[in-house]
Structure formats: structure tokens, C-alpha cells
Image (cartoon, coloured by chain):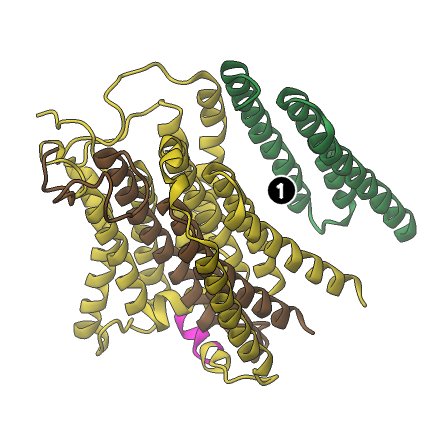
């Protein structure tokens, strides 16, 4: 057995063990910490699958930003845990659920094992037209050029999620700012950390977005890193969460999908088809669209983490 | 057994684990965690499909990879909305589970008394 | 020359792995949270430093080497901050935190 095979098997067992801890851990906080570790280990699995863009996205969004969201929620819900102690289902229900889940897992594993060695693939078609888009990274080309409509709809889903989260506020808080209503001094340790990390993080985030045209990276990964920097600044209380009726905030939230959609509609007039890019101008247009996407993602993710408004809006 | 097949099997196991967590655990937050486990297990099955589509000089088919990236972002958006709903439920009723009887006030969908 | 570089890499990375192992043993065996924190942060930072040192001769460019050192510096920064915050939480709430 080669060293890489041993690494793969060890990594697979570790991922499964940490996932089992997440499901069976005694407290919600411990389970959430286990989930963050699980997300980071999962990005290693994605690297072994030769999908580096996915590994970056899983580490940044799946492990990082989701982890912040869930740990914050677990800390706030600690008091509620005691009330659910008596509600755990009976042993018979658990046994039945376990049998059902083993069946589902076995069926899926059977499908995985029965897959042919060389499956149907669109890679040749993707690589064939790659020079026309001017990009070097086929995954970015799929996201912004070949399947651009899917990505637009995904950006719209993000905006809908923000609207959904904001609409959970009480009526009188609509338009206010998320977070507590106290104006406090910055939290010293986190303030030091944020002041050292934010400049580096912003450079790294923009770099990963820019380099995603030719190498693994892209708008989602870079935007997630920029979002993380803003989240850290808000957690360190160096800056307050903005009011949700702020014009610049709402403009930044919709800038990504709006510019993307406008480019798609303009393609009808200029290049002959919905979401067609004129030849020769494809790469500048793609980078222009991606820049606004990065802005939107960097603003949307922290707003989703910050939650619904909890203060009255100031006029 | 290639790394792709191993990842696919782990994905299948994760779907089973996550499904058990969603069914059995009464707390809403644990259900959200288990739901995310199901999602990442499904993405791993996408991963093996992508790996088996290696061709044209690439190690892995880029189309399923792009779909997984889209899926991860959408799963985060869904988790954020679910967590916001759970926290609102906790603020309204002091409970973090979804039992129909007990402390839930009628009309607790945000239109009730705040 | 390649052989010397390989031996150095293996030795440094092996030393790093030993320190990670020592830190994990400390995490599992030390009695209270503060001493566990102590073992983790010290041993893990040193372990990562040795691993980065072992990987430095294998990079292809100066930029790659600088990236590795930057990764180590950022992990130190994050680890130190996390240790401070956890330590303060333990002191406030007692060892049951």
C-alpha cells in the first residue's frame, strides 16, 4: 500500500470520526466546534480529489464563515439546551432511524462502487472553448462563462437569504442595525488581532479573486476572505454593524447580481444571445462582473452572520 | 480503491450519519449541523463523479466542481436563514426545539406580539 | 546535495510531528484547561515552525518560501489570540468553561 493510499484511508476515517462526534457529542457547543474541524478536514479531502477551487471554498465558506455563524448561535442557545433534555426520542425510534440511515448510506455506497471507471464527462468541451474566454482556470470559466445563469441565480439566492434574515426582526426594528445596542470600547485582544490581520487579509482576498482567472481561486473564495475580515472587525467592536436601511449597504448587496444580470441582458444586444460575451472582450467583461460579485459576497456574508436588526433605526 | 472511490464512500456514510442526526436530535441547532453534514456528503459524491470524469488534461471534470461551489454557498445561505429562525424562536419562546406543544406561543411567526 | 536537503527536510518535519504529538498528549493528559492551553499553543507553534523549516528547501521560488513563512506567522497570530481569549474565559468562568 503506498503512502498516499494510507493517507487517503487515514483522512477518510478521521473525517468520518469527526462527523460522528458532531452528531453524537453531548453538548451543542462541542458539536459545533467539531463541525468546524470537520469542514477543514473536508477541504483536505477535496484537495485529494484534485478539486482545489472547491477545497478553497469549503475551507473559507463551509468551515470558516458557517463555523462563525454556528458557534455564535450555539453560545446564545446554551440556556435552551436544558429544556430539550426530556425530548430525546425513545430507543425504538432511534433503532428504526439507525436502520433507515444505514440503508440509505449502503444504497449510496453501492451506487458509488458501481460507477464505471471512466464516466461521462464535459471536460473536453470545457477545455476546447477555454481560450476564447481568455481564462486559464476551467472552473472559473464554468462559473462565469458557460453556466453564468446558474451563478446569477445563486447570487440572487444570497440576496433572498439576507431579505429573509432581515424580515425576522420585530416591526419597529426594521431598518435598524444588527447587534446589541451598547456602544462599547473595542475588545482589546480581538482589536489587536483584527488590526494586524485585516490589511493582510484584504490583500490575500483580492489576490485570490484576481488570480482565480488562471489558477485556483475566484470570486467566491476571495469574497469570503474579505467577508471574514469585516466579520473580525465587527467582532472586535472596532466598527459597528451598519444600519440595514443604509443606502450604500443595500446598493452593495445587489451590485453583484445586478451587474451580472445587466451583462447578460446586454449580451442579447451586443453578442447575439442571453449571457453571450462578445469575442475578444470576454476576459475584461468577466473580471468586471467578478469584481462586483466579490463586493456583493464580501457584504452579504457578514450581514447573514450578523443577523436581523435588533435596534431601532436612527433617522 | 482510488481516492475518488474512498471519498464517495465517505460521502455516503456522511449522508447516513447526517440523516440520523436530523431525525433523532430534538434541538434545532443540532438538526442544522446534521443537515450540513448531509449536504457535504452529497457534495463528496459529486466529487467522485467529477474525478471519474477526468479528461482533456484535467484531473477532474470542472462542471461538477462548479456545481459543488454553488452548492456550498447556497448551503451557507440556507444555514444562515435557519440559524436566524432558530434564534428568533428562542427569543420568542425560550425553547430551541420544534415541539408543537409546550412553550410555543400561537402566531409565533413574527407577526405576534413582540 | 539533494540527499543532504532530503535528510534535513525529513529531520525537521519529523521533529515538527514529534512536537505536534507532544502537544496532543498534553491536551489529553493535563489536568486543567489552562495547562492544556499552554501545552497546545507552545508545542503546536514550534511544531509548525519545524515543519515549515523542513519544507523551505523544497520550494521552487523565493515567493513560495515567503508564503510558507507568512502562513506560519499568521497561524502564530491566530493561535496567540485564541489562547488569550480562551484563557480569559477560563479565568472568568472557572475550569468548567
Closest to the observer: A122 or A130? A122
Residue A46: x, y in percent? Answer: 57, 60
Instruction: Establish if C17 lies above or below B2.
Output: above
Residue C77: x, y in percent? Answer: 58, 28
Secondary structure mostly seen in the magenta stretch: helix
**Snapshot quadrant of residue B74:** bottom left
- Residue A128 belongs to magenta span: yes
Residue A52: x, y in percent? Answer: 55, 59
Q: Which chain is brown?
A: B
Closest to the observer: C66 or B108? B108
Instruction: Establish if C36 lies above or below A167.
Output: above
The segment highlighted magenta reads: A127-135
Q: Quadrant of the N terminus of chain A?
A: bottom right
Q: Quadrant of the C terminus of chain A?
A: top left
Q: How many marks?
A: 1
What shade has chain C been given?
green
Residue at which label 1 appears: C67
What shade has chain A been given?
yellow
Instruction: Establish if A187 lies above or below C63.
Output: above
Residue A270: x, y in percent? Answer: 20, 72
Amino acid at each position: 500500500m503506498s503512502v498516499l493510499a494510507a493517507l487517503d484511508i487515514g483522512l477518510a476515517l478521521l473525517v468520518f470520526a469527526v462527523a460522528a462526534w458532531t452528531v453524537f457529542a453531548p453538548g451543542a457547543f462541542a458539536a459545533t466546534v467539531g463541525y468546524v474541524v470537520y469542514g477543514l478536514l473536508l477541504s483536505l479531502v477535496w484537495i485529494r480529489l484534485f478539486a482545489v477551487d472547491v477545497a478553497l471554498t469549503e475551507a473559507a465558506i463551509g468551515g470558516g464563515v458557517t463555523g462563525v455563524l454556528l458557534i455564535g448561535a450555539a453560545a446564545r442557545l446554551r440556556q435552551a439546551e436544558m429544556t430539550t433534555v426530556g425530548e430525546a426520542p425513545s430507543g425504538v425510534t432511534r433503532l428504526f432511524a439507525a436502520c433507515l440511515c444505514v440503508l440509505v448510506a449502503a444504497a449510496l455506497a453501492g451506487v458509488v462502487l458501481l460507477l464505471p471507471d471512466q464516466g461521462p464527462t464535459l471536460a473536453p468541451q470545457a477545455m476546447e472553448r477555454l481560450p476564447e474566454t481568455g481564462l486559464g482556470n476551467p472552473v472559473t470559466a464554468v462559473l462565469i462563462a458557460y453556466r453564468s445563469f446558474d451563478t446569477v441565480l445563486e447570487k440572487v439566492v444570497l440576496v433572498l437569504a439576507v431579505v429573509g434574515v432581515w424580515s425576522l426582526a420585530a416591526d419597529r426594528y426594521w431598518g435598524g442595525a444588527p447587534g446589541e445596542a451598547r456602544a462599547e470600547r473595542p475588545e482589546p485582544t480581538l482589536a489587536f488581532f483584527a488590526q494586524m490581520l485585516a490589511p493582510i487579509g484584504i490583500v490575500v482576498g483580492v489576490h485570490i479573486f484576481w488570480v482565480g482567472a488562471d489558477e485556483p481561486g475566484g470570486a467566491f473564495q476571495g469574497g469570503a476572505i474579505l467577508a471574514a475580515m469585516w466579520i473580525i472587525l465587527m467582532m472586535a467592536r472596532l466598527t459597528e454593524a451598519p444600519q440595514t436601511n443604509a443606502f450604500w449597504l443595500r446598493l452593495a448587496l445587489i451590485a453583484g447580481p445586478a451587474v451580472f444580470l445587466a451583462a447578460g441582458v446586454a449580451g442579447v444586444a451586443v453578442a447575439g444571445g442571453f449571457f453571450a460575451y462578445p469575442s475578444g472582450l470576454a476576459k475584461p467583461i468577466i473580471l468586471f462582473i467578478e469584481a462586483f460579485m466579490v463586493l456583493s459576497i464580501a457584504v452579504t456574508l457578514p450581514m447573514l452572520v450578523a443577523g436581523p436588526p435588533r435596534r431601532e433605526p436612527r433617522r | 480503491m482510488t481516492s475518488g472511490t474512498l471519498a464517495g464512500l465517505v460521502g455516503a456514510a456522511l449522508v447516513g450519519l447526517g440523516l440520523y442526526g436530523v431525525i433523532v436530535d430534538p434541538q434545532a441547532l443540532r438538526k442544522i449541523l446534521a443537515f450540513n453534514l448531509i449536504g457535504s456528503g452529497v457534495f463528496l459524491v459529486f466529487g467522485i463523479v467529477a474525478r471519474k470524469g477526468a479528461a482533456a488534461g484535467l484531473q477532474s471534470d470542472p462542471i461538477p466542481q462548479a456545481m459543488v461551489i454553488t452548492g456550498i454557498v447556497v448551503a451557507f445561505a440556507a444555514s444562515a436563514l435557519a440559524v436566524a429562525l432558530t434564534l428568533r424562536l428562542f427569543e420568542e419562546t425560550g425553547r430551541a426545539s420544534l415541539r408543537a406543544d409546550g412553550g410555543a406561543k400561537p402566531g409565533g411567526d413574527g407577526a405576534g406580539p413582540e | 546535495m539533494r540527499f543532504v536537503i532530503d535528510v534535513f527536510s525529513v529531520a525537521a518535519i519529523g521533529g515538527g510531528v514529534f512536537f505536534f504529538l507532544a502537544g496532543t498528549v498534553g491536551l489529553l493528559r493535563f489536568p486543567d484547561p489552562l495547562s492544556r492551553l499552554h501545552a497546545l499553543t507552545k508545542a503546536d507553534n514550534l511544531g509548525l515552525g519545524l515543519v515549515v523549516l523542513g519544507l523551505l528547501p523544497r520550494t521552487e521560488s523565493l515567493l513560495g518560501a515567503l508564503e510558507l513563512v507568512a502562513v506560519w506567522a499568521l497561524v502564530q497570530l491566530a493561535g496567540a489570540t485564541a489562547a488569550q481569549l480562551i484563557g480569559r474565559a477560563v479565568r472568568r468562568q472557572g475550569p468548567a468553561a
